[in-house]
Amino acid sequence: MRATLFAYVATAFMSAGAALAAPQLVMVEQPGCAYCAAWNKAIAPIYPKTPEGQYAPLVRAQIKDGPPEGMTYARRVLFTPTFILIDDGQELDRIEGYPGEDFFWGLLGKMLEKHSGFTLSEGATGLSN
């Protein structure tokens, strides 16, 4: 019984660790940022439903607070919004600014494809409508 319980707990911790190691997209924002508001209006409602959003879930961070716990940026964030692809706690790449919906999906897709196992053919962006 004790061995079974130990195996269950160990499996649960390993699964949690694997989930934490998955790619994440950090959106660095700040109050009053008009481009952040535009992204929030156009993209935020659909992002979690897209292949990109399911592959790299969104984590929000305030520019004044620095990186979320357990994450490291390669360099200081100067502009908002900045979208930082994080894997295993480390920055892989970033998009600085919000160039509009059409450009955002293309830039994000290329960034995910370049730095992870994501492929654009898996579900080419939130623009598929």
Image (tube, rainbow, N blue to C red):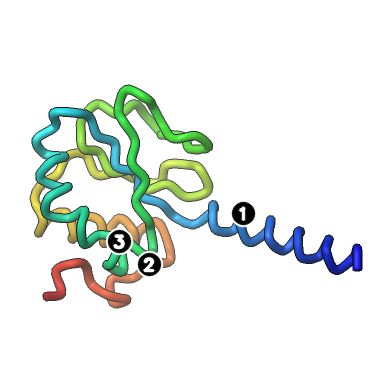
Q: Nearer the viewer, residue 17 or 74?
A: 17
Camera-near label (1 vs 3) is 3
Camera-near label (2 vs 1) is 1
In the figure, 115 relative to 39: above or below? below
At horizontal 31% and vertical 69% (from top left) the residue drawn is 51
Please give the residue where the numbered disc 3 appears in the rendered image.
48
- Tell me where residue 42 appears, x and y as whole percent: 11, 54
**What residue type is disc 3 on?**
Pro
For label 2, count other residues whose C-alpha is less than 10 Å away and answer few (under 14), some (14-19) or many (20+): some
- Residue 35 — which label? none
Please give the residue where the numbered disc 2 appears in the rendered image.
118
- Tell me where residue 19 appears, x and y as whole percent: 54, 58
Q: Are marks 1 and 3 in contact (CB under 8 Å)?
A: no
How many marks on residues?
3
- Between the residue at mark 1 and the residue at mark 3, the CA separation in whole angstroms equals 21 Å
Left of 20 or right of it: where is 126? left
